Image: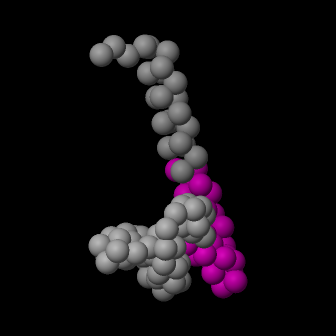
């Protein structure tokens, strides 16, 4: 398998751009002073992103996926993002095994 140098360069530049925007966001965020309301709004972003990714699949597939999406959404309100995701994956696996 060969790799075209231009393709490799494009992948490298995209990786650097992604890393720069993530690091830049963290650096800029360090200079902000947020009040309680703004902090709560920022904490709501990860669950919202999770649901934006999960919702199209949940609504376009079967009942197991839809129920698991609801479980994930409810878990994301109280649990860390990784735990909510793991709970959703476990829920869909159990529901599929149960025949839904």
> Can you say which quadrant of the picture contains the C terminus?
bottom left
> Can you say which quadrant of the picture contains the N terminus?
top left
Q: Position of residue 59 (x, y in %)?
A: 58, 67
Between 46 and 35, the one nearer to me in the picture: 46
Residue 48 falls within the magenta-colored stretch: no
Residue 28 falls within the magenta-colored stretch: yes
Left or right: 84, with 94 as reference point: right
* Residue visible at 57% across and 62% down in the picture: 60
* Residue visible at 32% across and 78% down in the picture: 98
Q: How many marks?
A: 0
* Residue visible at 60% across and 75% down in the picture: 44
Residue 51 visible from this viewpoint: yes
| Position of 60 relative to 47 (above/below) | above
Residue 54 visible from this viewpoint: no
Which residues lie in the magenta part? 23-47
Q: Position of residue 94 (x, y in %)?
A: 31, 76
Q: Position of residue 69 (x, y in %)?
A: 50, 74
Left or right: 94, with 48 as reference point: left
| Position of 10 relative to 29 (above/below) | above
Quarter of the figure with residue 5:
top left
Secondary structure, magenta segment, majority class: helix
| Position of 72 relative to 62 (above/below) | below
Left or right: 7, with 32 as reference point: left
* Residue visible at 33% across and 13% down in the picture: 2
């Amino acid at each position: 398998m060969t790799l075209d140098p231009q393709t490799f360069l494009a992948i490298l530049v995209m990786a650097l751009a992604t890393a720069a925007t993530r690091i830049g966001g963290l650096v800029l965020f360090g200079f902000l002073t947020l009040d309680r309301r703004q902090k709560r709004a920022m904490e709501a972003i990860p669950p919202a992103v999770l649901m934006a990714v999960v919702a199209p699949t949940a609504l376009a597939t079967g009942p197991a996926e839809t129920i698991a999406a609801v479980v994930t959404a409810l878990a994301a309100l109280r649990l860390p993002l990784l735990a909510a995701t793991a709970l959703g994956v476990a829920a869909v696996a159990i529901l599929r095994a149960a025949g839904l």
